[in-house]
């Protein structure tokens, strides 16, 4: 009887949290619900919750996992399965049998992985292979979480921008104002490409680092890539092209517009620029073209490959390592991040390209850091190390005497 009471309490606890808020099912609450070994109507209820969480159609194809830091949940619906489904990595070093939810056709399991884990995975049901993809997980940095007592900055969506330099394009953009900003004191500035994504996690990091004094009072500018009048994206042209056009777009259009509201510093030491993938090479190109305006670069899985190949088929970013070696050193500090399992396609090999960049920067005597892991073409590793990346980038910050 005591055993049954314990089971009943566990089952009741799992399903109070599950059924009262199905929409907020998480990997952790799913694990608790599975561990309670539901049966009958309770199992049906859990199966419906899993269908809502992962998506009914996706579940039949083998749903993508749900990730909460280091806790990962998988699920699949497999009508008539003669063998128990499992998740398996391509190298077979990771295998996770899925648990059947009561007598339903839904199977699920939750695993905890070490920080930095990575794998290519798929579902297997006997000889059948379904779904799959790349997975990498990292511990969330403490400075990427909101903290009690830390003053919060304000993120404002700006009026959609119509560019003259990128004629015929419009874009969304946002400006972050730190809580410590004072109109009478010019602030530093940091620009983020693909800002529609970066705006969702950078402001919390800025709040924490500025409060600690690890980052100067810095206005953040988050820019989405342009969209042309026909609805087609202008991202690759803006980001991958080796020219000064994007630098001019920032210096002649965006920064003057921001300065209608905020007083910003103009010295290169007080300006930084960041991006991921093509946004990463774009950040480097801005500093390369205007090192007297931007001196700090943060690049995640940067596309230093031959995307913008042009009519000669050789005009892309793969040229940068050679240019860095042949050109007098410029006053640029850069933090590079990439992973050994990044892209390899007709444009080039991202891991090799970033290693070439690092070697060229070292040869030419640049102030740089290269964080090379095992990850894929994603922002997961970059986000995990963002606070420390920013600390390194802004270390020993000293505003220059001009344009204070």
Image (cartoon, rainbow, N blue to C red):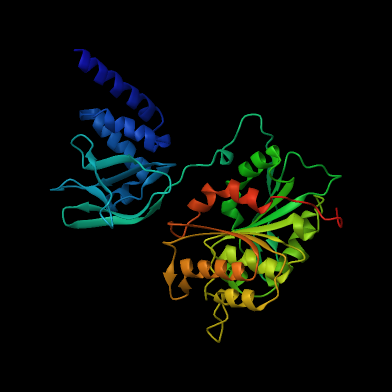
Is residue 12 placed above or below 49 in the rendered structure? above
In the image, what residue occupies the spot 62% across and 69% down?
A: 238
In the image, what residue occupies the spot 52% across and 74% down?
A: 307
In the image, what residue occupies the spot 78% across and 51% down?
A: 398
Q: Nearer the viewer, residue 134 or 350?
A: 350
In screen coordinates, is 298 left or right of 254?
left
Is residue 259 placed above or below 280 in the rendered structure? above
Picture mark count? 0
Q: Position of residue 82 (x, y in %)?
A: 12, 48
In screen coordinates, is 325 left or right of 341?
right
- Outermost residue, bottom side: 312
Quadrant location of the N terminus in the rendered image = top left
- Outermost residue, left side: 82
In screen coordinates, is 39 left or right of 59?
left
Q: Position of residue 374 (x, y in %)?
A: 42, 57
In the image, what residue occupies the spot 64% across and 39% down?
A: 208
Is residue 224 placed above or below 218 in the rendered structure? below
- Outermost residue, top side: 1
Q: Position of residue 165 (x, y in %)?
A: 72, 71
Q: Position of residue 211 (x, y in %)?
A: 69, 37
Q: Quadrant of residue 269?
A: bottom right
């Amino acid at each position: 009887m005591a055993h049954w009471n314990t089971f009943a309490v566990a089952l009741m606890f799992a399903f109070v949290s599950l059924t009262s808020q199905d929409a907020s099912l998480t990997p952790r609450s799913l694990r608790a619900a599975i561990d309670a070994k539901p049966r009958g109507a309770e199992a049906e209820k859990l199966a419906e919750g899993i269908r809502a969480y992962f998506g009914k159609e996706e579940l039949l194809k083998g749903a993508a996992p749900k990730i909460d830091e280091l806790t990962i949940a998988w699920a699949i619906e497999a009508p008539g399965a003669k063998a128990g489904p499992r998740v398996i990595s391509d190298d077979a070093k990771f295998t996770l049998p899925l648990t059947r939810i009561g007598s339903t056709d839904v199977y699920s399991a939750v695993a905890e992985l070490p920080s930095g884990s990575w794998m290519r995975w798929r579902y297997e049901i006997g000889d059948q292979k379904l779904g799959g993809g790349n997975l990498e997980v990292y511990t969330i940095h403490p400075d990427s979480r909101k903290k009690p007592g830390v003053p919060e900055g304000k993120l404002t969506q700006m009026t959609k921008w119509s560019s003259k330099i990128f004629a015929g394009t419009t874009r969304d953009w946002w400006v972050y104002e730190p809580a410590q900003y004072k109109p009478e004191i010019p602030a530093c500035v940091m620009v983020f490409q693909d800002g529609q994504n970066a705006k969702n996690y950078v402001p919390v990091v800025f709040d924490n680092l500025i409060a600690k004094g690890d980052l100067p009072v810095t206005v953040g500018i988050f820019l989405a890539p342009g969209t042309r009048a026909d609805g087609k994206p202008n991202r690759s042209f803006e980001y991958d092209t080796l020219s000064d056009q994007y630098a001019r777009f920032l210096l002649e259009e965006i920064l003057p517009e921001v300065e209608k509201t905020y007083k910003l510093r103009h010295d290169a030491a007080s300006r930084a620029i960041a991006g991921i993938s093509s946004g990463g090479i774009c950040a480097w190109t801005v500093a390369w073209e205007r090192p007297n305006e931007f001196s700090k670069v943060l690049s995640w899985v940067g596309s230093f490959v031959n995307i913008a190949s042009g009519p000669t088929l050789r005009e892309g970013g793969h040229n940068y390592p050679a240019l860095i070696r042949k050109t007098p050193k410029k006053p640029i500090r850069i933090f590079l991040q990439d992973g050994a399992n990044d892209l390899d396609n007709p444009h080039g090999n991202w891991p090799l390209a970033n290693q070439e960049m690092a070697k060229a920067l070292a040869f030419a005597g640049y102030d740089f850091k290269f964080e090379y892991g095992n990850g894929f073409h994603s922002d997961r590793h970059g986000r995990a190390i963002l606070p420390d990346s920013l600390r390194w980038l802004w270390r020993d910050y000293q505003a220059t005497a001009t344009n204070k």
